[in-house]
Amino acid sequence: MNDYDDDDIIDYENDTQAGEQFNEDNLNDEDYNLLYDLLPELKEKTKLYQIPDDKLKELLWLNYFELDDTLEEIKRDFKPKKTTSNFQKPSPDEQKKELHKITQIISGVNLEESSKPAPKKKLTTTKPKTKINVDKELQTKNQKPNLSFVVIGHVDSGKSTMIGRLLYDLKIVDSKTLHKLTKESENIGKASFSLAWIMDQTSEERSRGVTVDICQTQFETETSSFTIIDSPGHKDYVPQMINGVTQADIAIVIIDANSFESGFDTQGQTREHLTIAKNLGMEKCIIAINKMDTNSWSEHRFEQIRDTLAEFLLDDLQYEKRNIIYIPVSGYLGDNVVNKVKKTECPWYSGKTLIEILEQENQLVNHAIDKESPFIMTINDIQELSRNDELLISGRINSGLIQPGESIIISPSQETGVVDSISITMSNVGSSSVKNDLQKLAIKGEFVELKLKKLDVLDNIKVGDLVTLINNKITPVKNFQCELNLFNLERPLLIGTPFILFRSNISIPARLSTIHSIENTKSGKVSKKRKHLSSNNRAIVDIEILDRDIPLVTFDDDMKLGRLVIRKDGMTIGAGKVTKLL
Amino acid sequence: MKLLSQSIQKDSSGKITLETTDIEDIYTTHQLLNPNDEISLLTVRNIKPTLTSTTTIRKTIHLDLVIESIDYEVDENTLRLKCRTIKQHNDVPLNSYHTAIITVNCKFTIWKQIWDDFNLNLINESCDVMNKAELGAVVLEEGVAHICLITNTVTVLKNKIEKSIPKKQRNNNNHDLAMTKFLQMVSDSTVRNLDLSKLKSVLVVGPGTISSKLIQVIFNNAIKENNKELLSHKSKFVIGHSSTGYLQGLEEAMKDPNIIKLLNDSKYSKNVIVFDLFTKMLNLDDGKAWYGDNECFKACQIKGSVKYLLITDTLLKSTDLNKRKKYTDLIELVKEGGGETIVFSTLHDSGEQLNQLTGIAVILNYPLPDLDESDDDDDELE
């Protein structure tokens, strides 16, 4: 049993009358500090009793520094003294006003800041290492702008194979590497996976023939520079796929022409992936209908799939018709990927190949950089370096620009550091050597590696943290308001129901805490107080994050970071926009 | 729980002596006790031998106390009772404050003004050895693992493991190395935190193949260390599927029919199933599932309409005696009508969710669609 809890006031009171136990100077440091921490509060609460400080200290000591117990004892043993001084004090009404004022001041105080020990380092901005002409640098960057694509679709529709084919036909993967992979895959009886193995590198992915995590590759053609992100199609790995989508500008949806229907029913991932992509702000989609070779390039089949999809995309997801491009391809054979399909095989398609579409899209996108927008980057991967105040973080820059030498702060841990160097990795698939291009400047949309130095505690920095310039700190939050759109639910979403919340690459348990208003998107009816949300409801709600505080940005501040998706029991049940941080 | 003696008068007042035997009993005791109940037990206290001495000595003494407030430390499995003495003791004067602590293997006598059916049922249930079924569970995904112990009424989080796993890269295998290390950590912690000989089974759930990989690691280690005891428990490990490595994955896995079959006599899994049924029916909105005081009381008035009454322990444990009576009467009413009452522990996820939904709900045998409409009228009248 704990000494702390055994307080017996009367017993001890007798001792105090003997009056020789308590001596402030005999206290150890810890107790001494505690005593002085508690004293002001106690004094405030016992104003009416007018007890001298020494007596108060003694009482505190006797009650093992338990404030509540001390108060109880005082209430029992002392009588409040009324003096004229009481009337000099402000009247209750005035006190109320005063209290209100104080409450306002307190509510304005940022706890995060005050509860932290004083920072060891000065929180000042630092100038870039070298002075460069920013405009000129931006111009050179814009000559070959970067566009990021994510490849999504149902499991086994051929996403990894398609990317493998693209890289092989563009000569980014040499035939020696492919030959080696083909041999290896034949050894375990999965010869048709050789192209996919360019993207799937872990032993698990190769032996199961299923992509588990996203894999991004940067490559260049004569006119453009691309980042292509392969994502897993398996139901269990939708979280990773969401991460991929948040790093992309445009989605390529791969459809298996043979088993389109199974991927498109309510349980299939084609439907779920498209819903997620649209709700995370992906306005453009390239629909690649794959494995056409095994369908003898049937135009009828192509049109059938196109029409079924169009109905869903345009009516349910509200895509604009001009933002959807359909293309028949064969990733395994490489038809219509980089090389056009032979006219003898497919006489009815005369459109562009996949890479031509990609280049065209790259030219269309507005790459203008708003120099004024604040620098934000989401950490996607962390590598430790030999020195213990240095770290290599990689990710995509969400907005703004950064130069080596500038000081940054990382939310939620509020660790600060300095950017030592910035590099862009051009993957040379197949060979183990990595080519790092050092950059004088990195801008929105680029996938970069930042070498940070002068960090304090490396363990505090996690994947999903937000990096900003030091004068633009993002305070992490636990509660926020959001506009939530629910999809088809099997079970209603109750207040208190836990679910998993996705914000870019963070996934974290959270729950509904308040429902402000509900609107049924199908009937348009606004209903009043209810404690649950059902299918197709649009609602303004408060969400509480359960695990820890996370850095959030409202939709108004950043159109991408301000979006989120919620999932429960392995199903995507809703998506929303952060409207207010609480 | 062991029931040592019991004497209850005609007016339902009386005292019962109990002994806690496992962590489940701590919860039961928490359910039983209310402020103003009296308790007598052996407890430790710092006592000054003489009036003038400066030092105190710790003494184990028997005290009679009246309870002022109760704190339940779920993770430490202790109950802290803030009390006042109601009998003079040689070392302790009357009306002194004392904090008594109840843990496993404590004997104590409780005196209550009124012992109601809810209380007595609790004692009966917890004394029934057949009723005990503890379950171990590991919920994990890449980089996060939760190891917990599930009893009928409490989910105790034993350990949480977090490790950042680097992304896969072409030029190194840091990802695979980190994953191996992570699984090793989870494996060690599972063996350390779960006493397999006492558990009925251990549920391992997670997305993809991670759960089977963990089991592989655990038993590869066992073979390496020649841990025969661990190997003999191999059949207790059950693989489940969930989409996440956070605790909510546990409930997701428990809805799987195969898992239900394996755990069919666990009270917790029954709670999960009934609550799931309730939410499904609520989604259909066919007038057969309702929540809220007004709706439920109205439904229970119609004999034979209620199939299940779902109620949280917090309502039954309300400090307001009238309120408590209201709910125990309601349970009686449902019983008469042939319905079943299921008490949810708020220390499990499903109970916590029900609590957020007013704490009371019903599943009906046939639709009663107008339960809330008349409720709205009442509101307007007020």
Image (cartoon, coloured by chain):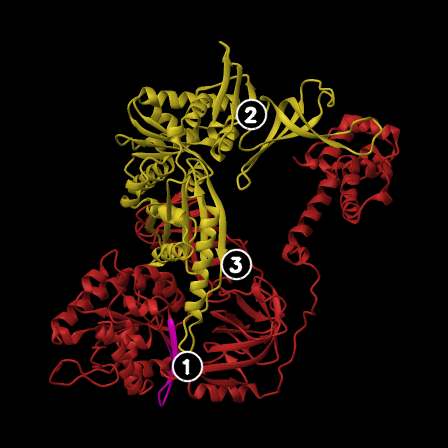
Chain colours: A red, B yellow
Range of residues picked out in magenta: A215-228
Q: Residue B1 versus residue A301: which sits nearer the camera? A: B1
Q: Where residue B35 appears, x then y in whole percent?
A: 58, 25
Query: Which quadrant of the figure contains the N terminus of chain A?
Result: top right
Nearest to N terminus: mark 3 or mark 1 = 1
Q: Amino acid at mark 3?
A: Ile
- Which element carries disc 2, helix, strand or loop? strand
- Label ID, residue B107: 2
- Dot 3 falls on which chain? A
Residue under the image location 83 percent in, 26 percent down: B51
Q: Please give the residue where the numbered disc 3 appears in the rendered image.
A: A550
- Which element carries disc 3, helix, strand or loop? loop
Q: Marks 2 and 1, Cα distance to the nearest angstrom?
A: 73 Å
**Residue B370 in the figure: left or right of residue A560:** left
- Label ID, residue A146: 1
Q: Marks 2 and 3, Cα distance to the nearest angstrom?
A: 46 Å
